[in-house]
Amino acid sequence: MKIGLLQEGEVMPGRTVASRYEEMIAEVARADKLGFSSWGTSEQHFSPPRFTVSAPEVLYAAIARETNNITLRIMCAVLLQWNHPILVAERLATLDIVSKGRAEIATARSNNLTTLEAFGVNPSQTRAQWEDGMKLLSKLFDEDFEGYDGDFWKIPARTIVPHCVQRPHPAVSVAASSVDTHRMAGERGIGVLTFENYFGFDYLQECIDAYREGQSDAKPMFRGQNKNLGLYVATAFCAETKEEACRVARDVALGYFKFILDLYIPLGKRASYEYLDDKMTRLLENENNLDFLLTETPSVLIGTPDDFRKRLKDLEARGVDEVLLRIDGVPHEDIMKSLDLIGREVIPHFSGAKVAAE
């Protein structure tokens, strides 16, 4: 079990985006020394103060120069019409160079109607655009790109520069919420980053099982196969006592949960996102129930180091390879304390995790 970090530049009252970026750089530098496996941020637009990173490739480059070991995983490149796959490939290769081979990439088709509408993308077309973008991306990793004639992208032969230093290329994953996308990821030989939408442990197991079933008959679309299953934990915070952890992280946990509800209720009415719709009632009934989030969903992990160890051991037994802890939206000093506790008292207990710094 590997333990990674996810942050999205959440800005607290009285703070600025600029100050939060500086704090994040310091936090990732600390996580690097503590043995966290990876760090990443999502690409988000028009959603402050919870999400403020709209140009993640610039932030990754700054962090690459302040770290030595931690994997820098793009989480995620939205392969839709505003993110041309050629630009995605060029930026990934540049990050791989400046990080000395520590880059990875996850892709997504977006779940934010506000963003899709602003960039003129029909939600019913996101899967088709993403699939065509992935096929093109697989060709762009070749040294000699001979052009591409797809359903959405049509590119003549061109010289792509630079190329990644990792061979055959950095690991590729997809962010997934549906059982079908998990199975598809397994079939295509790419990793998967699971967000189970607060639907619960049984739903998470459905997704894991579908991914492993897909792997059993994989026809890899990239030369380098990736079998890593990571789990997004939407709100994580570790403290010496559970009471202290809940005090610090209560507002961000409930706030993020409400954001997801507001996002998915209308989205579930759209074509290709219907799987969301029939699961909303139970979540709405617990909109302000922190105890429900702590016990009924793997998307929230707030508590002591012992609580973390128990939850992560359970997730490991279920087949999760890596957890991605979103530690964000609380004061910088508290984030640093939480990282230190996890690095000293959680990470060393898991095989495959890096050894925490002294």
Image (spheres, helix red, strand yellow):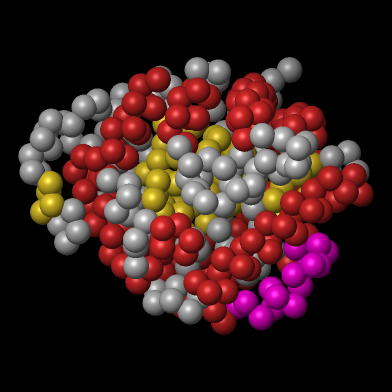
Quarter of the image where one finds residue 124: bottom left
99 falls in the magenta region: no
In this rendering, is residue 161 above or below 346?
Answer: above
Residue 277 position in % (x across, y down):
54, 79
Question: Up-down: is 56 above or below 163?
Answer: below
Q: Quadrant where the C terminus lies? A: top right
Residue 194 coordinates in the image, percent (x, y): 52, 56
Magenta segment boundaries in residue numbering: 279-293
- Residue at 50% in and 30% down: 59
Q: Is residue 251 visible?
A: yes
The N terminus lies in which quarter of the figure?
top right
Q: Residue at x 69, y 51 (%)?
A: 235
User: Can you tell which quarter of the image residue 99 is in?
Assistant: top left
Question: In the figure, is residue 71 to the left or right of 150?
Answer: right
Where 162 falls versus 346 (above or below)? above
Q: How many labels, in total? A: 0
Does the stretch in magenta take in 289?
Answer: yes
- In this orientation, which residue lies closer to the viewer: 216 or 170? 170
Q: Position of residue 243 (x, y in %)?
A: 92, 49
